[in-house]
Amino acid sequence: MAYPTVSGPYGLVPVKMVSGTPYAGVTRLYSIASGYASNIFKGDAVKLVTGGTVEVDTADAAMTAALGILHGLYLCFVRPTAAVFFFFFFFLTATTAWLATVM
């Protein structure tokens, strides 16, 4: 089967963990600062910044090591009876706080 024509980038895809073991679907949760002023999409490299939140790794002159690849985002609404979670593959500029799953 031929590889399909791609009209846009896929982003980065995990192959192995830092330890060298094959990627098996494991992710870690990190926060994105409420009101963060940049879009983040699945497959984008992210870095850990002061305050313990993640941001898009722009590969600037600071050469901060990438923490990992964004897999998705959880948005949580807390109700009096229960918490409701929604899963997304993108974060849009200046939205409220989210939890990011990072590979």
Image (spheres, rainbow, N blue to C red):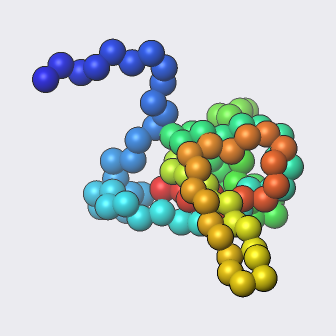
Rendered view: 63 above or below 75: above
Q: Which residue lies at the image location 70% right of the left edge and 66% below the top edge? A: 76
Q: Is residue 45 left or right of residue 50?
A: left
Measuring from the top left, give residue 72's x and y in whole percent: 55, 52
Q: Where, by quadrant of the figure, is residue 52 drawn?
A: bottom right
Residue in the foreground of this view, choosing between 37 and 89: 89
Residue 87 in view in this figure:
yes
Instruction: Find residue 83 and report its horizontal and vertical position in percent.
Output: 68, 76
Point out the residue furthest to the front here.
81
Above or below, 39 against 34 in this view is above
Q: Nearer the viewer, residue 81 or 99?
A: 81
**Residue furthest left as drawn:** 1
Q: Position of residue 97 (x, y in %)?
A: 78, 59
Q: x%, y% of residue 58? A: 68, 34
Position of residue 59 in the picture relative to residue 3 (left or right): right
Name the image quarter holding residue 1. Answer: top left
Seen in the picture, residue 29 relative to 103 is either above or below; the reply is below
Question: Which residue is at a point 33% across and 47% down the rendered structure image?
Answer: 15
| Front in this rendered view, residue 32 or 5 | 5
